[in-house]
Amino acid sequence: MKKIILFLIVVLLANCDKKFEVFNASVKEGPTPWNKSIFDDSNEKFTFAIFTDLNGGERDKVFEIAASQLALLRPEFILSVGDLINGDTQDHKVLLEEWDSFDERASKTLAPIFYVGGNHDLTNKTMHDLWASRYGPQYYYFVYKNILFLVLNTEDYPEKKSEELWKARSEYKLAIKNGEMARASDMPYKKMQERITGDIDKDQSTYFVEAIRNNPDVTWTMIFMHKPVWLKEVEPEFLAIEEALSDRPYTVFNGHLHNYSHQVRKDRDYIMLGTTGGAQHPKRQMSFDHVTMVTIDKGQPSIVNLRMDGILDKTGHIPLDGESICFQVSKCKNNE
């Protein structure tokens, strides 16, 4: 019996060592009806996806369709850039229901998702506490196949400032809800720089500077945040992160403004994503629903944006009967 078991183990190990041919064609010599047989199949190559704001006025079904499309695209993993729930409340039960809804819908993507907190996710103490108990730290980093990923929290304010912002934002949102547009345009929240750029504190900056120093041999760094903190006129904490990366290649992604843009800063790409279900600007042509695919090969990224109305399944249709959905409000009838 022992000899039989030993024989089976040897056979199994032998089969494990067998390597299949990657390419084996019937044409063995002479001209070939293909242009080359060197394939782009590096073991170092991988693709990850990014989806952007689905809240701040979430539109029905868009994120569910995006999740189905991402499942078809099959990235190795996915990152967000924040605004995953509606938030705008201190009601713990409501927040739990919103996170349960997001988590259930996000699971349809199949791939692991790395969360980034936005202002709709981290606006008040209740929301910060719930995130901590449910998802842990609000900023973090990881390394995947020698690429360093930095995930920032741009809602990182002192407690007093956070309370001030929450109060001002709540009053502003109430005025908007009541149709008091003229009054809202002159309210304190409208004039707060943090409304656009957010902020990070010294501890967070130090954390990422150390992470960069502790990973000197990575081939590229990817930075993710919700608000474009780098737009602040004076931002020493983010500047310290940029300086720590001054001799390395990196790319920055953010969301928040629901309008796609690309700019070069410090000779690097800073990419502001559009929407994946969030409210859109009816007059802005770069406000559209999309997902972003990033392929890393030989340590360098290739970035492509896929409009959701162009990602079709095998039947030639947008998943979940998506043909009825408006994915770019500026091009839809009546700017719906």
Image (cartoon, rainbow, N blue to C red):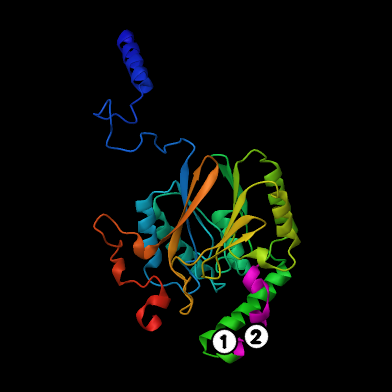
Mark 2 secondary-structure assignment:
loop
Residue 276 forms part of the magenta stretch:
no
In the image, what residue type sits under mark 1? Ala
Q: Nearer the viewer, mark 2 or mark 1?
A: 2
Q: Which mark is residue 175?
A: 1
Q: Where's residue 68, x and y in %?
A: 35, 57
Regarding residue 138, the answer to whether it shows in the image is no
Q: Distance between the residues labelled 2 and 1?
A: 9 Å
Callout 2: 10 Å neighbours few (<14), some, many (20+)?
A: some
Whichever of labels 2 and 1 marks the residue nearer the N terminus, that label is 1
Which residue is more in the foreground, 260 or 164?
A: 260
Assign the magenta stretch its main secondary structure.
helix
Q: Marks 1 and 2: in contact by CB < 8 Å?
A: yes
- Residue 193 seen anywhere in this rendered image of the structure: yes
User: Is 268 situated above or below 175?
Assistant: above
Q: In which quarter of the image is residue 189?
A: bottom right
* Magenta region, residue range: 183-198
Residue position marked by numbered label 2 in the rendering: 187
Decide: is 57 above or below 22: below
Q: Is residue 106 above or below residue 38?
A: below
Depth check, front residue: 168 or 144? 144
Q: Which residue is drawn at 60% across and 82% down?
A: 172
Question: SS for tag 1?
Answer: helix
